[in-house]
Amino acid sequence: MSHVIIIAEAGVNHNGSIEMAKSLIDAAKACDVDYVKFQTTKGPEAITSKFAQMADYQKKNLNQEESQADMLRKILLKMEDFEDLNSYCSKKGVKFMSTPFDLDSIDFLAGLNMDFMKIPSGEITNLPYLRKIARFHIPVIMSSGMCTLGDIEAAMNVLTTNGLKESEISLLHCNTEYPTPFSDVNLRAMLTLKQCFGVRVGYSDHTKGIEVPIAAVAMGAEIIEKHFTLDRTLPGPDHVASLEPEELKAMVDSIRNIEQALGTGMKKVTSSEQKNIAIARKSIIAARDIKKGELFSETNLTVKRPGNGITPMRWDDVIGKMAKRDFVEDELIEL
């Protein structure tokens, strides 16, 4: 299996602090992720009206109710801060990504030489947004929370008719609830995306714990995105559904183990088990002392370890043959 891309989603878990954002980068690097990803916008007014309310999970996680704009105003970084974070990532040896949430942030992030543009689930029905991203010809990773296959097909059509090749688009199965109930994960839908669209697929996870993204890799995910935080008890909308650093490291290590374990798909004897064939398998053995000239039979033969003699699969070939010499009990039979 090819290398699974692991994206540590810092998102807005910096709580508006550039220093905390850099600490998140340090933590992500220590966990050996491929990318650390943030969320970029020109400002709350660019993405939400003053009348838009918080999602239920945001109200619950923050234990308060206010407008989305007021909530975001407290936790967003300035656009120019992401230039600093991009440089910091480069210095630390981990790749930078950020999701644009408005047209101006698309322009801004396109200038930071990211490997991918990330389209979040909430923008998959935003025609002007999709059209603009496609025209930069930067490979796209698109989440598909809250989507039907028709929604995804429509978004794919916008991207491909405005300059992107299908091979430059990756789709992430996703559920947009924080945290996502296990009963709503529906991991098999990731395979449906692969079958329907024929592109690279992965999984953006909002469940608690690390089991589901590991399972996704075992099922064929080539990209994993997972929220993380320095401390789940910090105030903010996404901390509760995020991993702490030690959990993120455990997830990364497990995914790398699964990568190796998936193998090539060819069924063969591996080098590590070759030496155990003689120990674990069995051979045709003398069940009692056998004299020269005696015929081998069901009563004087048996099957026991070790497996370096005649395989029991040749039992019918041996029965009825004449012993060419004496055999003692438990001796390997030779023809």
Image: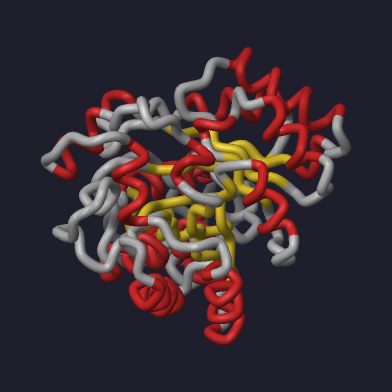
- The quadrant the C terminus occupies is bottom right
Q: Residue at x 55, y 67 (%)?
A: 82
Q: Give percent across and percent down for residue 184.
A: 32, 24
Q: Residue at x 36, y 47 (%)?
A: 72
Q: Is residue 36 above or below residue 196?
A: below
Q: Is residue 100 left or right of residue 236?
A: right
In the figure, residue 115 lies in which quadrant?
bottom right
Q: Give percent across and percent down for residue 110.
A: 73, 57
Q: Is residue 220 visible?
A: no
Viewer-proximal residue, 141 or 218?
141
Viewer-proximal residue, 67 or 157?
67
Q: Is residue 71 above or below residue 19?
A: above
Q: Give percent across and percent down for residue 19.
A: 37, 78
- The quadrant the N terminus occupies is bottom right
Q: Residue at x 25, y 38 (%)?
A: 58
In the figure, residue 195 lies in which quadrant?
top right
Q: Is residue 134 left or right of residue 324?
A: right
Q: Is residue 239 left or right of residue 124?
A: left
Q: Residue at x 42, y 53 (%)?
A: 284
Q: Is residue 264 above or below residue 229?
A: above
Which colouring convention does the figure follow? secondary structure
Q: How many marks?
A: 0
Q: Is residue 77 above or below residue 106?
A: below
In the figure, residue 257 lies in which quadrant?
bottom left
Q: Is residue 197 visible?
A: yes
Q: Give percent across and percent down for residue 138.
A: 78, 51
